[in-house]
Amino acid sequence: MSPTVFRWKGYRFFFFSREEERMHVHVMCADGEAKFWLEPEVALARNYGLSGTQVSETMEVVKDR
């Protein structure tokens, strides 16, 4: 199960409830997907196909939320 946290500009922000203990969020759009750690600070964990601009933009959204 992967509940959607919110949507923004064509991106879906979600998580897998049983993936791992460390808090994180996945971001997906038509171009690819990224995973961000939420603790101890917001940081990119993995990127599959998003451009550097997309990663930076979505990381800022994650930080703001």
Image (cartoon, rainbow, N blue to C red):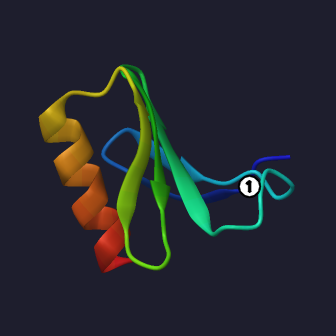
Q: Position of residue 34 (x, y in %)?
A: 44, 39
The residue positioned farthest toward the left in the image shown:
53
Circle 1: is it few (<14), some (14-19), or many (20+) Cα within 10 Å?
few
Q: Is residue 54 left or right of residue 36?
A: left
Q: Is residue 23 left or right of residue 48?
A: right
Q: Is residue 16 left or right of residue 63?
A: right
Q: Position of residue 22 (x, y in %)?
A: 66, 67
> At 50% across and 76% down in the image, what residue appears?
39
Q: Position of residue 1 (x, y in %)?
A: 86, 46
The front one of 1 and 34 is 34
User: In which quadrant is the C terminus drawn?
Assistant: bottom left
The front one of 4 and 37 is 37
Q: Is residue 41 left or right of residue 2?
A: left
> At 49% across and 71% down in the image, what residue appears?
38
The front one of 46 and 53 is 46
> At 41% across and 21% down in the image, what residue appears?
30
Q: What's under tag 1, amino acid-wise?
A: Pro
Q: Position of residue 21 (x, y in %)?
A: 76, 66
Q: Which residue is mark 1?
A: 3
Q: Is residue 42 above or below residue 40?
A: above
